[in-house]
Amino acid sequence: MMAISDSLKSVKNRIAAACVAAGRPPNEVQLLVVSKTFPGSAVREAFAAGARAFGENYVQEGLAKVQELIDLRGQIEWHLIGPLQSNKTKAVAEQFDWVHSVDRLKIAERLSEQRPAALPPLNICLQVNISEEASKSGLVPADVAALAAQVAALPRLKLRGLMAIPEPGPGALAQHQAMAALFKALQAEGLALDTLSLGMSADLEDAIRAGSTMVRVGSAIFGAR
């Protein structure tokens, strides 16, 4: 198996090549390293190799890693990218820097109320079920604009953009493009969004071609789960 540092470099090269192919500057796309199910030692190794933003799917696992790596707290950005239940919002509001999976006003309101005043605003992405699969969380596209306006008005939060997990297969590129169109439509309505969290290990090239500004990569860096 390739060392984490080598895998990380390979993924960064893929991102750079995809940006060049799309006629975009490579610094427009941020790499979010998805560390779910991998130990804190793997996160520390990726950090040593230059990674600074890490995504966790499960609240308890993420909180444990935040504490395990507390010596790096000022240098690591922690992103929650998995589902968030209302009974876990307080810990997330206190310990994470980003939440990508907001799809209900109630969750956003709780995060806003529970974000400590001493911390910067919590960065928020709305999760969109762009493929409208029954098994996936997220807003249907038609409901995104209304919730975006409500979340943007909440204190202690900063609405940064949208996140989606397109359904793999021949229709994936069209879903990426639909997400980019939705993102641009919200910007045109006056929302100051800068983050389209779109693309993973298998489809980051399509996502970047469509306009993604943040790709979430785990298995291509750490190996199969």
Image (spheres, rainbow, N blue to C red):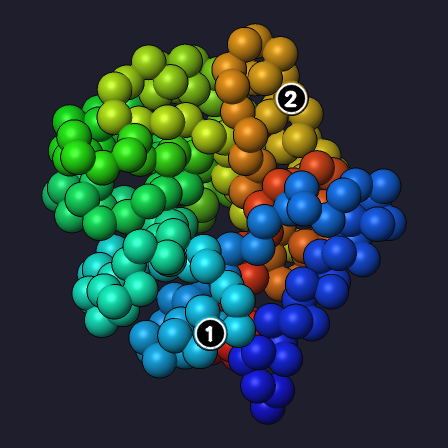
Q: Position of residue 47 (x, y in %)?
A: 45, 69
Q: Position of residue 146 (x, y in %)?
A: 42, 13
Q: As rendered, which of 49 and 153 lies closer to the eye? A: 49
Residue tagged 1: 48
Q: Amino acid at mark 1?
A: Ala
Q: Position of residue 179 (x, y in %)?
A: 63, 32
Q: As rendered, which of 104 and 131 lies closer to the eye? A: 104
Regarding mark 2 in the picture, which secondary structure is present there?
helix
Q: Amino acid at mark 2?
A: Lys
Image side of residue 134 versus residue 187, left or right: left
Image side of residue 181 versus residue 194, left or right: right
Image side of residue 77 versus residue 96, left or right: right
Regarding mark 1 in the picture, which secondary structure is present there?
helix
Quarter of the image for residue 112 reads top left
Question: Real-space Cα distance between discs 2 and 1?
Answer: 35 Å
Q: Residues within 10 Å of mark 1 (few under 14, many from 20)?
A: few
Give the answer, above or below, for where 108 lies relative to 220: above
Q: Mark 2 or 1 closer to N-term?
A: 1
Residue visible at 63% across and 80% down? 6
Residue visible at 69% across and 72% down? 10
Residue tagged 2: 184
Residue visible at 74% across and 62% down? 14
Q: As rendered, which of 167 and 220 lies closer to the eye? A: 220
